[in-house]
Amino acid sequence: MTASSLPSFTFRNVLISSALLRVGLILYSEWHDARSLVKYTDVDYRVFTDAAIFISNPGAGDENQAAGPLQGFFGFNFGFGSPYTRETYRYTPLLALLLTPNAWLHPSFGKYVFAACDLLNGWLIYRMLLTEIIPEADQSPGESSSSGSGAGKRRKLNPYLEERRERMATIYSAVHLLNPLVFSISTRGSSESVLSLFVLATLYAAMNENWDWAGVLLGLSTHWKIYPVVYGVSLLGVITATSYSSRERAKMGRIATLVNPKTIRFGIVSASTFVLLGALCYAIWGYPFLFESYLYHVHRLDHRHNFSPYFYLTYLIYPSSSPPTAEAVPLPWWNELIRSPLTSFVPQMGLALGTGLAFGRTKRDLVFAWFVQTVVFVVFNKVCTSQYFLWYLLLLPLLLPELSMSWRRAFSCIVVWAATQGLWLSEAYKLEFLGENVYFSLWVRGLIYVMGNCWVLVQIMKAYRATR
Amino acid sequence: MVSKLSTNSTLSPSYGSHPTIITDVQISLSPTNSDTTCTLFLHYELPPLLFVDPYELELRGAEYQVLETRGRGKKELERPVHALPVNEGDDDEEVEVVIQRTLPAETTGPARVELPIHVRYGEPVASSTSKPYTVQEFSGPTVVLTCSDEVLSCDRTTTLPQFLLDTIPTSLRDLSLCVASQSPEQSLAISAPIGNTLDLPTVELGTTAVVLACFAWVAWEAWRAGARLREGASSKVKSN
């Protein structure tokens, strides 16, 4: 075999390899699950599939019926069942609707959809890297491109530079496409790649300054899962930066950079999309949709062990369903404050929104703003499982070209990020599978997880567009 | 010939959150009709600390079918034991599960049935030992054997739980039954760790302190990063 016959490292080849890898894993999952009691497929996929079956097979009478006031349209009966007949289905009904072919076409249909979303995400990452991010990063760290349409700005480059940018874009997008966490999660049947697609599409529209589309996609993302709403804050400053000249912006106060006709239009488009989708789902599926998709998450108490140190506190103060045997002693005010949901909500949302406002000023900084916002949202959340890491890992390939840190520091960040998880997982194994009482030490490791991830985030903030 | 039915159940492992009740059923009978099929029914009564995931049991459809489940906590898979709803309809304290398994004709010998169960978080207690546990004892399943077109003559002294009787299909209920259950001395037991309420002050203060300290730290570094980026942007504007 000669050097010229070796497959070249192009994005097309990375995409094909990623597709083949995912198809192979999905086929393997079918083989494995048919022969083993320990399934490759995630429990959540069974939940989605059951919900899809329920939604497409309404029962007789009141059993498994969509509970909303709108059951038909001009004489045409929708004939929907309720996905919420399936216990623990706490997602938008649109997800169950998307997966209805699981019931009548093939049980693995959903996995192929999730894998396809993975590939689309990889393509979006590649395009954004090639057309926006790497060209920006090739400028000096302190510079930012002037406002204007993103699509037609590229000058004719010398072939060497163009080849270098394509190679870098391919490498960084391969970080996502060939990330074991990414392809294992989608082929096991987790739906995170669908939300990732909406988030990346929102970012892509923003980078191309298609603000109406960005608003629609942000509304869709937020309908799917609430957390993307924080991205709206960072988009406001960027909309102003790209829609008004520097002279006009110089006359604006800080409030006006956030609230002006352009940002108001964006807010209306985004909010309208969210409300319309919610109204449609409520009209068909009624209160169960509202409760399971949104309200449940407001009041949920996650007492079982997870990365967040809040789990042990929640467990120890979990309200009992039995009447108290003795009169409750009123707590001092500082104790009430500590136990108040505000103590967790204020740091989380304060940082998520504050960093959005602080960093969402230019289009070039948008990826960085979203990355920081997502990390703080996940780290300071009252519950955290491994799937949440995908929310910010998705943005990491887009951020890498703008990070300037030594290999030693980068290695330290990876080690700290992985080691804090490993430290926690090794203790959680003792609790879950060996039945050892390690609640306290697991809580301590949850604190270490928070501190370690904050340290990594601080290193990334220091390395972002740092002077080389 | 007197038919014989005996059962022995173990818990594997007797610790951790996801043990399995393994029931070995010894059957000794000689059906006279080669078309005869026999059916095993197993009735489990689980205390509130334990629960089954009905969707998980559906995946064992090749081994057995779950006929019925009931009990408080049948649906509340995600709550600790002390937060299970009380007085919910006619559900009793315990979770009852009845499964059915069809056996081939001329059945003699052992049959093994495995029921995966899960352990809830128990109610925290104040414990000076700092690492408290709770030990939950419960009985193995009551096993019932019926055979179509067959009159079983077997020792039957165990009284059947009403829920089990009501769940057995009518056509089989009228046949003669063999019943076996584990003796009380052979009850199963699982040890589960529980939280210590004496940890609460430390956990409250520690969580709050670390979260607020990290919040302040990240906010400070974010401010510095923002200032650096703004300084870089204004330098570019000036140079232009």
Image (cartoon, coloured by chain):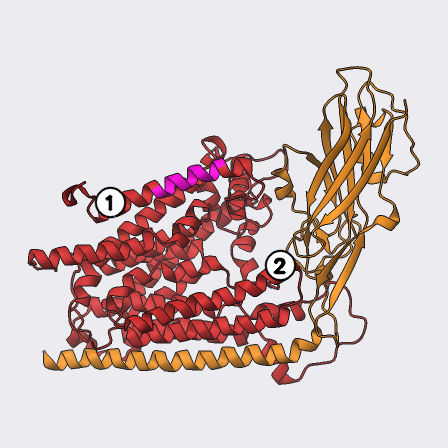
Q: Quadrant of the C terminus of chain A?
A: bottom left
At horizontal 75% and vertical 77% (from top left) the residue drawn is B128
Q: Is residue A362 left or right of residue B11?
A: left
Residue at 55%, 63% in the rendered image: A426
The kind of secondary structure element at disc 2 is helix
Q: Position of residue B217 (x, y in %)?
A: 42, 81
Q: Is residue A23 magenta?
A: yes
**Is there any visible trace of residue A72 in the rendered image?**
no
Q: Is residue A163 left or right of residue A357?
A: left
Magenta range is A21-31
Cα distance in 3D space between marks 2 and 1:
42 Å
Going by the numbered disc 2, the residue's amino acid type is Glu
In which image quadrant can residue B3 be found?
top right
Q: Main secondary structure of the magenta part?
A: helix
Q: Chain of mark 2?
A: A
Q: In the drawing, what numbered circle is on residue A13?
A: 1
The residue at the point 75 percent across, 74 percent down is: B127
Q: Which residue is mark 2?
A: A432
SS type, badge 1? helix
